[in-house]
């Protein structure tokens, strides 16, 4: 993406809005050189983020899939759909502003965890268990103890 004002290739995504046509995403970008802001409309296919799975296989970043994964893990918790969408929006922005277009599944998992921890500690643990972040029951117990201590 090149700045339309000064042609600098260094731009940053500052906001993302879905348009009524769900295959087109409207993004506000800021040029890091001249600091002017402009809007781009990008087709969903062109997000270009690749996810590297544990098996080493790569696939396109799928927002819906990530969303379903989180919902499944935290469904009994008082976390709203809006909160989940916010978490994903935030992660997407982070990923889009990185130099690389590839991201490991485990890294996305970690990004979700950091954000869930702030919203709901138990939801965070449930998601953790799904993503096999804990090597053993002892490790899980330690984490629970740590959260309890933080909440006092
Ligand atoms: Zn510029």
Image: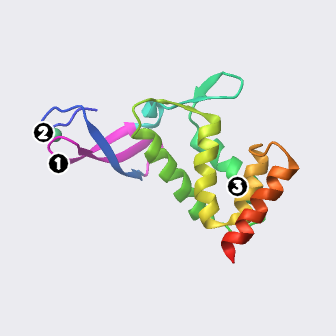
Establish whether ligand 1 lies closer than 8 Å to the Cβ of label 3. Answer: no
Establish whether ligand 1 lies closer than 8 Å to the Cβ of label 2. Answer: yes
**Residue at x-position 70% and y-position 47%:** 69
**Mark 1 highlights which residue?**
36
**Residue at x-position 70% and y-position 55%:** 71
On whether residue 54 falls in the magenta region, the answer is no
Magenta region = 20-42
Image disc number at residue 49: none
**Residue at x-position 85% and y-position 45%:** 136
- Check whether the beta carbons of the residues at disc 3 and disc 2 lie within 8 A of each other: no
- Check whether the beta carbons of the residues at disc 2 and disc 1 lie within 8 A of each other: yes
**Mark 2 highlights which residue?**
5
* Side of 111 where 24 appears, left or right: left
CA–CA distance in space, label 2 to label 1 = 8 Å
Residue 90 vs residue 40, the one in the foreground: 90
Q: Secondary structure at mark 2?
A: loop
* Side of 149 where 52 appears, left or right: left
Query: How far across and down, in percent of the image, does residue 127 sit?
Result: 73, 52
Crowding at dot 1, Cα within 10 Å, few <14 / some 14-19 / many 20+, comes out as some
* Dot 3 or dot 1, earlier in sequence: 1
Q: Residue furthest right?
A: 137
Crowding at dot 2, Cα within 10 Å, few <14 / some 14-19 / many 20+, comes out as few
Quadrant of residue 107 within the rendered picture: top right
Image disc number at residue 71: 3
In the rendered image, the vertical position of residue 138 relative to residue 119, given as above or below: above
On whether residue 35 falls in the magenta region, the answer is yes
Establish whether ligand 1 lies closer than 8 Å to the Cβ of label 1. Answer: yes
* Side of 90 where 36 appears, left or right: left
Q: Main secondary structure of the magenta part?
A: strand
Quadrant of residue 103 within the rendered picture: top right
């Amino acid at each position: 993406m090149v700045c339309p004002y000064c042609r600098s290739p260094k731009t940053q995504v500052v906001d993302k809005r879905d348009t009524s046509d769900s295959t087109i995403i409207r993004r506000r970008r800021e040029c890091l050189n001249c600091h002017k802001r402009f809007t781009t409309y990008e087709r969903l296919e062109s997000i270009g983020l690749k996810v590297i799975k544990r098996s080493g296989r790569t696939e396109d970043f799928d927002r819906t899939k990530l969303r379903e994964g989180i919902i499944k893990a935290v469904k009994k918790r008082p976390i709203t759909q809006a909160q989940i969408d916010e978490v994903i929006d935030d992660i997407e922005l982070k990923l889009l502003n990185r130099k690389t277009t590839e991201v490991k599944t485990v890294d996305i998992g970690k990004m979700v965890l950091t954000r869930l921890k702030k919203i709901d500690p138990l939801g965070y643990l449930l998601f953790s268990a799904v993503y096999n972040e804990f090597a053993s029951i002892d490790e899980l117990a330690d984490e629970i103890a740590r959260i309890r201590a933080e909440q006092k």
